[in-house]
Amino acid sequence: MKFKLFILILCSTFFLCSCWDQRLLKESKLVYSASYDLESDNELLVTSVIKTSTQKSTGPTQSETTNVIFQTKAKTLSDARMKFTRKISGDYATNKNRVLLLGNDLAKQDIYPIFDIIYRDPRSSLGAKVIISKGRADEILKLNKVEETLISEEILNLINTGESHTIVPIESVQTVCTTIFDPGEDVVLPLVEKNEDNSLNISGVALFDGHKYTGKNLLDSDPTMLLLLKNEMQKFARFTLEVNPKEKDIRERFVAIQVKKSKSKMNVKISKDNKITVNLNMKMKVDTLEYPKDELAEQKEINFLNKELSKLLTLKAEDVIQTLQKANCDAFAIGRELISYHPKVWKKLDWNKDYAKVTIKPKVEVEVIGTGIIK
């Protein structure tokens, strides 16, 4: 009986049909980075970097990887892709895209239309880094190389380094989608600029209000403070702070610290008249990386540093919060906290107007736990 059943199942497989979507790699033109800029006539300028291999003259078995840059103007991204098919031999494939650059002016408009085709296309690279360009984005891609590194790899390496040093948030096409559709949280994205010597630099982070870039940024070490307050510390987090402003030697005025451990807690309080107060308390343990004044063998000096660093980093946190509220950027997801735990209060709010009125009180407590090997 079992043998007959086996024969029946085996024979029935011959009558089954199947189909699949096949795209050969050799027939594809793989996009490794793309940028989008707003033109004066409100059309999009789309720039794509496609990586190709060319045979070296030194030998038939040796090849060199180079970039080919394509540009087109279009009304939408779908229109741009259609135009690229007229310029490129092969399938215009975005499934390997690593970098998505938005020009400064374009990002100030609603950015969702840029992402719509990406989210609808199952072949899209959801892990691509989303970056705001300080100025035109196509000027960065047109560098082609930074020294000997191809531009796509240079941007990706720069952002990965910034992420590991808690300088920029870890954001991708996929994570941006989650945040921009959340009425209780706003996204912040890495801000990159081209220098006069044709190198690249992370300027800070760009602040968003809903789907739009506000034009306001967090610069220098402020993005690190923001990420620590959000409990998003990565491998490194460093600050250089002026703790001895009266010292004659300028180098003896400063201390450089490495954050070893950081924990932040947010507490939202609602008064009887529905006034919102948010307490952001953060405890931080740090090592001293540099202290030319060199008196760390004394507990008195360490106590002084604990006090001064706590005061200075609390002031820095206040500056970060002030900038966020001026930009109407709810990067701490206070609105999400209200939606989850105070829904009745949330329904009475117009968050676009009421967020700026929220009282946010930060407090940073620093403890120096390492002073290096010098006694």
Image: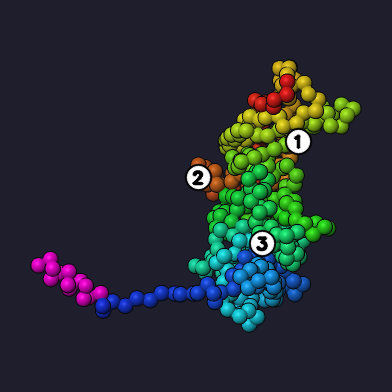
Given this view, does label 1 or label 2 mark the residue nearer the observer? 1
- Residue type beneath disc 3: Ser
Q: Residues within 10 Å of mark 3 (few under 14, many from 20)?
A: many
Marks 1 and 2 in Cβ contact (< 8 Å): no
Q: Is residue 10 magenta?
A: yes
Task: Tell me where residue 61 appears, x and y as whole percent.
Answer: 61, 70
Q: Which residues are magenta?
A: 1-13
Residue in the picture at 61% in, 76% down: 81
Label 2 sits on a secondary structure element that is helix
Q: Residue at x 60, y 50 (%)?
A: 170
Q: Quadrant of residue 5?
A: bottom left
Name the residue type under label 1.
Thr
Total marks shown come to: 3
- Assign the magenta stretch its main secondary structure: helix
Q: Is residue 44 above or below residue 129?
A: below
Circle 1 Cα neighbour tier, 10 Å, few/some/many (<14 / 14–19 / ≥20): some
Q: Which label was assigned to residue 240?
A: 1
Q: Which mark is residue 152?
A: 3
Which residue is label 2 attached to? 340
